[in-house]
Image (cartoon, rainbow, N blue to C red):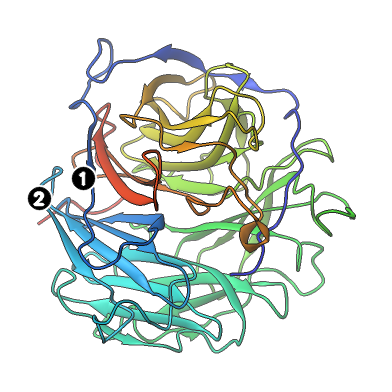
Amino acid sequence: MVPRRGARYGAAGLLALAVLASARPGGGGAAAGPGFVVSTLANPVFTGADTEPSLRLARDGTAYVGAIRGFPRGVDLWRVGAGGGPAAYLGSPDTDVPTPCCTALGGGDMDLAVTDDGVVAYTSLWLGSLTVGRSSDGGHTFVSQPLGSPVAGDDRPWLATDGGAVYMTFHDILSGNIDVERSAAGPEAGLVYAPQRPILPPTDAAVGNNQIGPLLADRHRPGLLYQVYTTTSEPMISITTGPGSGQNSVRMATSADGGASWTLHTIFTGPPATGYASIFPAAAVDRAGTVYVVVSDNSGVLVFSSADRGATWRGPVRVEPPTGGATVFPWISAGGPGGVVVAWLGSRVAGVDAPDASWQVYAAESLDAAAPVPAYRLFTVSDRPVHAKGICQQGIGCRSGRELGDFFSVEVGPDGIANFAWADDGLGGPAVVRYARGGLVLGAPNQPPGG
């Protein structure tokens, strides 16, 4: 709801270049899954724009997709059958009054998590707090409450689960810190949260000057959490975007005790004028426990990896083809050891605000992403341009160019196939949510097998 942290754009310093190959889904070489099948998630209730889709998969491969309408209109939710099966619209979980559409305590930002026993948890931002809730019947019904945070003034909540407990991080607007809460496994998981220790020490220079990405939990190591964020390596003031406009330092906070204590690590620091806050930095962990982080400087997509739980990092590796265009909205997910999918919106025209830009969804997939020089295969995922003209990343400070929101999602399913959900206004009119799956078989992800 508040303006996102800004970023200046520039070159990223010395990079390792991945071994790249253009790819048709199912092409030769590594094991391949089905081609990308794209569909639109129908909404029989809301005719406005649905943006910023959050995507999470259950152990059996069922996909849950949520999207925001914007406060105070609430959020929308869909369920997609395992393997890309039939899709069903589940309504708006943050309102008890489905008609008349659409009023709710929520809709500013949202996220989802699905526990090992199938509980679907959600969070939805409103001006005073966060509406949170849970469903134990596949999203048919939800129990919700509107005070998920004790802090008055939150922004950009993210959810994660280690299989049992559900964790939430968000910006504390008043303090400028990154707050974390824990919802214990059991009948109130996803409904009642207890505050943990703020992630950053109060004297840390990143307090009030950070951009947080999604929270990450290791499902084979309960209580092991990763929070990626960007900040500046030195104080910077811009007369146009204010403090923190560079966001040239990529960092990771780790916790081994469910958020009770945190250790801070620097992943990478670029030139002072470079920005990596291109919304948002994102993280993933593969089945072997290797952690990956992806960022964009708006002209490239950069991937880092850590084999020691975030203490040391390899990279960056540039994974997109050098077309001279623009990239935004990086996201990442992992499957088996080294199996990684990176996704982004790309335009072949330089400059994120170019009036003649045409954007599509791209992905790069690897089976050896933790190697010194990993090999990635490139895919065009979307079946048409998803947006024309520029994309703005200044949050509610945007006058135009924010029709798709601030991010989209990708997640590897239990069959090793990547699932995607993005907002699309390429045909004109309000943005709709589209869903796709396909690409390489990346291996079973970091969660117990379905059952």
Residue 292 visible here: no
Q: Quadrant of residue 248?
A: top right
Label 2, on which residue? 86
Q: Residue at x 38, y 80 (%)?
A: 132
Amino acid type at mark 2: Pro
Residue 82 visible here: yes
Amino acid type at mark 1: Pro
Q: Nearer the viewer, residue 401 or 243?
A: 401
Q: On the picture, is 380 further left or further right than 448?
A: right
Mark number, residue 222: none
Q: Quadrant of the C terminus?
A: bottom left
Residue 190: image x %, image y %? 34, 78
How packed mark 1 is, by other alpha carbons closer than 10 Å (few <14, some 14-19, many 20 or more), is many
Q: On the picture, is 25 further left or further right than 236?
A: left
Label 1, on which residue? 414
Residue 396: image x %, image y %? 62, 63
